[in-house]
Amino acid sequence: MRHRLVPFLIAAAVVLLDRITKAAIKSHIGAYDTISVIPGLFNIVHTENPGIAFGMLSNATGAWREVVLIGFSALVLIAISVVLLRPGGQRDSMLRTALALILGGAFGNLYDRIVNGTVTDFVEVHAGQHYFPAFNIADSAITVGACLLLLDMWWAKERKVTHASEVNIDR
């Protein structure tokens, strides 16, 4: 049972770090203000994103937008929790860590969306005039988790191919 709790502790740590950083940004930086940390490369900003990743659906109106945004996030949280709580699978630590990061990030942004109606973003990376959309700790956790999922799938495929070739050699 203890192994099943570890991913939820990782997710809780992501949520806590996300909440702390967003609260600090909201209390110390005015809306849409920018602090240049590394000129031409990295800024701390305070933006409020009413949409999803990269501001998609920001201009959409109506109750359906909130239902879609909150409903989809809730479904992701439920699906990941079910996968993490199912018996077996405790040995696949990369998969469980990936899902834990995605769970924590999704919960952090869902909390913002329910409480504030927007998600606070504050990290802005750019090269000269080319800006990557602002993001936050929750977004970063989701991205790292997704990358770990891809690596896990790739390595699982490699293990399967290696195992299949070993079986064929033994015949």
Image (tube, helix red, strand yellow):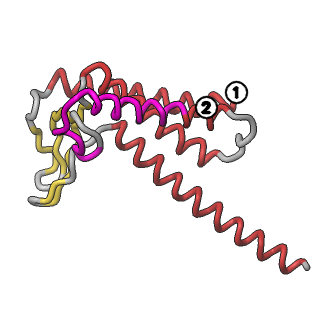
* Residue under the point 70% across and 71% down: 161
Is 27 displayed left or right of 165 in the figure?
A: left
Location of residue 74 (image quadrant): top left
* Residue under the point 9% across and 59% down: 129
Quadrant where the image shows the C terminus: bottom right
Is 48 displayed left or right of 113 in the figure?
A: left
Q: Which residue is situated farthest in the right direction here?
A: 171
Which amino acid type is shown beneath numbered disc 2? Val
Nearest the viewer among 83 and 24 is 83
* Residue under the point 74% across and 35% down: 87
Q: Which mark is residue 35?
A: none
- The residues bearing labels 2 and 1 have C-alpha atoms spaced at a distance of 7 Å
As drawn, 18 above or below 43 = above
* Residue under the point 53% across and 31% down: 78
Q: What percent of the width, then of the height, locates residue 68?
A: 35, 34
Secondary structure found at label 2: helix
Q: Which mark is residue 6?
A: 2
Q: Is residue 98 magenta?
A: no
Secondary structure found at label 1: helix
Question: Where is mark 1, residue-wise?
Answer: 2
Location of residue 116 (image quadrant): top left
Q: What percent of the width, then of the height, locates residue 58?
A: 19, 39
- Please, what is the dominant secondary structure of the magenta stretch? helix
As drawn, 151 above or below 24 = below
Which amino acid type is shown beneath numbered disc 1? Arg
Magenta segment boundaries in residue numbering: 53-78
Quadrant where the image shows the N terminus: top right
Location of residue 16 (image quadrant): top left
Is 78 displayed left or right of 59 in the figure?
A: right
Q: What percent of the width, then of the height, locates residue 36?
A: 11, 44
Dot 1: within a 10 Å radius of its alpha carbon, few (fewer than 14), some, or many (20 or more) residues? few
Residues at circles 2 and 1 in contact by the CB criterion of under 8 Å: yes
